[in-house]
Amino acid sequence: MTSPLNPQPDFIEITQLIHAARQRAVLAVNTALIELYWQVGWFISRKIAQAEWGGTRGVVISYAVCK
């Protein structure tokens, strides 16, 4: 441990801990978003595949204007 007269090494270590935690948080959020987008795409693809011929445009439009 450093003396109170030289807190710089402690401060550097704390900022490194914060930076590492932020990086882990960013990676977790990105992973969750990629999974979400994949699931939404899969859901829409499945609905389009189940629609009758000519009905796919209606499926896409209904999701595009939905709020």
Image: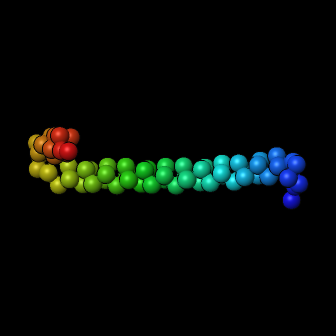
Q: How many marks?
A: 0
For the C terminus, the quadrant is top left
What residue lies at 87% left-to-right and 48% top-to-bottom? 6
Residue 23 pos. (x, y %) = 61, 49
Relative depth, front residue between 66 and 17: 17
What residue lies at 17% left-to-right and 40% top-to-bottom? 65
What residue lies at 48% left-to-right and 52% top-to-bottom? 29
In this rendering, position of residue 6 left or right of residue 25? right
Residue 4 visible? The answer is: yes
Relative depth, front residue between 36 and 55: 36
Q: Give the farthest residue toward the bottom.
A: 1
Relative depth, front residue between 43 and 16: 16
Residue 52 pos. (x, y %) = 11, 50
What residue lies at 31% left-to-right and 51% top-to-bottom? 40
Residue 4 pos. (x, y %) = 85, 53
Residue 49 visible? The answer is: no
